[in-house]
Image (spheres, helix red, strand yellow):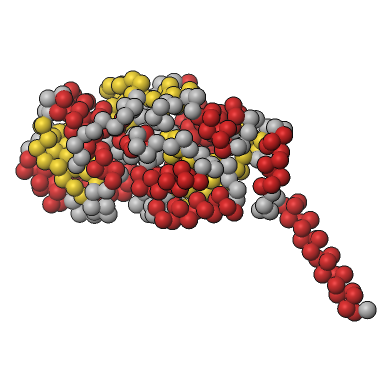
Amino acid sequence: MKKSMGKFFQILAVFSLLFLAACSGSAIDSSSNDDSKESEGDSKDPVKMGFILSLTGNFASMGTPVKEGIELYFEENPEIDGRKVELFFEDDAGDPQAALRKYEQLTLNQGVNIVGGGTVGSIALALRDKVDTDKKVPLINVVGSTDVMSWEKKSDYVWRTSFSAWQYASISGKFTAEGVGKNAVIIASDYVAGHEIVTDFIPSFEEGGGKVSEIVWAPLGTSDFSSYLTQIDNSKPEAVFMFIPGADGSRFVKQYQEFGLQDKYTLVEGGSLLNAPFNLKAVGNAVVGGKMITNYFPELENEVNEKFVKAYQAKFNKIPDNYVVNGYDTGKLISQVVKEAGSLDGEKLVSVLKKGLTIDSPRGPIEMDPVTHTLIQNMYVIEGKETNGEISFELIKTYENIKMPEENVGYKKY
C-alpha cells in the first residue's frame, strides 16, 4: 500500500510540474508545434529576438546604448502585428568566441526567430559566418562596420542597420580635404575596423588633393598616448583624423587637449565618439572645435527625432547617441519585416529584406539597400561648441543618401 501511494504521488508531482511550466511560459521546446502553426498561416506565436551585444569591457560604451535603443522601441511597441515580443540580451564582452556561444544558446535553448549583434567588426564577421552556414535565422548587424559584409561576405541572412566603414571614412576624407586642410596625420586603433577606416579614408582624402604625412597605430587598450601625441606634434599637420572608439578614444581626446594640440590642429573624428554621452562626461570641453562625421546627432530637426529624443530622455535621463538610434532602428526594421512577412519563418523574413525597405528614422530618411544589405543614409558633419559652459554640437554639412558601392572598390589596404 505504501509503495502504491508513493508511485501515485510521483506521477502527481510530474503532472504538477508540467502544468506549472505551461502556466509560467517556461522554455519548453515547442518548435514542432510552431512549424505546423506557421504552415497553417494563422500563428500568433511571440516574436523571439536574441541580441548579442558587448555590454561589458572596452566596447560596452557602444553595446549598452544599442540595448537601450532596442528596449525603448519595444517598450513603445510591445507587439508586432498582434504577436507579443520577447527580448533576450546576452553579453559577449567584446569576444567573438563568446558571441558564438551566446548565439548557440539563443537559437537552441530560447528558439529565437531573429538575432541581432556585432558590436565590433570581428564579432559581426564571426556571427555572419555562423548565421550564413545555418541559414535559419536572420542576423541584424547593429554596429560592426566592416565593408566585406556588403561585398565578399554578403549573405542573404545578414543585414546592417548601422553604417559601413566606407560610408564613414570616405565622407571623412572628402570633408577633411574640402573643409579642413590638405595635410593630415591619421591615428587609429590597431584592429580590423581601424585598418578598414584608414583604407577607406585615404583615397577620398587624396582625391580631394590631400596628403597623409603619417599614420599612427595605437593598440587597443592604450591608456597613455603621449608618445603618439609627440609624433603628431612633430608632423605639424593641418588636420588630425582619429578613429579610436570606446574608452580608448576618450583618453586620447582628453590627452590631446592636455598636450595643447586642441588649438593647434583640427581634430576630425570618424567613430561617433565626440558627442557620445560617456565621452562628454569623461572629457568635457576637450571636444570643442572637434569635427565629427556621423549618421545621427540628437539635435537633428525632424518630427520623428524630436519624439525619439524626448522618449529616450524620459526613460534613461540622458541624451541619445547614434548607437541608441542603431538599436531603435533595428527594432523598427524587425517590426516592419515581421509584419510584411506575416510569418516568423527565416526564409520568409529574408525574402522581405531582399525587396528593400524604407524606414522613418530619427536620423532622417533611410533605406535598406537590397544590393549591399547596408542602409542608404545621410552623413552629417558636426562641430563641438561651448556656450556659457554648455557643450553642444552644431551641424556644419550634410552629405545626402550615401550608398555603399555595389562591389569591392579595391583600395590599397593599410
- Is 302 located above or below residue 71 in the figure? above
| Residue at the bottom extreme of this rendering | 2
- Is 247 located above or below residue 373 in the figure? below
List x then y, in percent, for residue 112: 58, 45
Instruction: Please tell me which residue is depicted at 52% across the width and 33% down the height of the picture.
Output: 350
72 left or right, relative to 250 = right
- Is 286 located above or below residue 248 in the figure? above
19 left or right, relative to 330 = right
Q: Is residue 301 visible?
A: yes
User: Depth check: 88 or 123 in front?
Assistant: 123
Instruction: Please tell me which residue is depicted at 81% across the width and 61% down the height of the picture.
Output: 15
**Quadrant of the snapshot with the N terminus:** bottom right
User: Depth check: 190 or 381 in front?
Assistant: 190
19 left or right, relative to 226 = right
State the count of labels.
0
Instruction: Please tell me which residue is depicted at 32% across the width and 46% down the height of the picture.
Output: 246
**Quadrant of the snapshot with the C terminus:** top left
Where residue 285 sits, quadrant-wise, is top left
Instruction: Please tell me which residue is depicted at 56% across the width and 38% down the height of the picture.
Output: 346
37 left or right, relative to 155 = right
List x then y, in percent, for residue 293: 29, 31
User: Depth check: 291 or 58 in front?
Assistant: 58
- Is 236 located above or below residue 25 in the figure? above
List x then y, in percent, for residue 19: 79, 56
Q: Is residue 332 visible?
A: no
List x then y, in percent, for residue 74: 57, 37
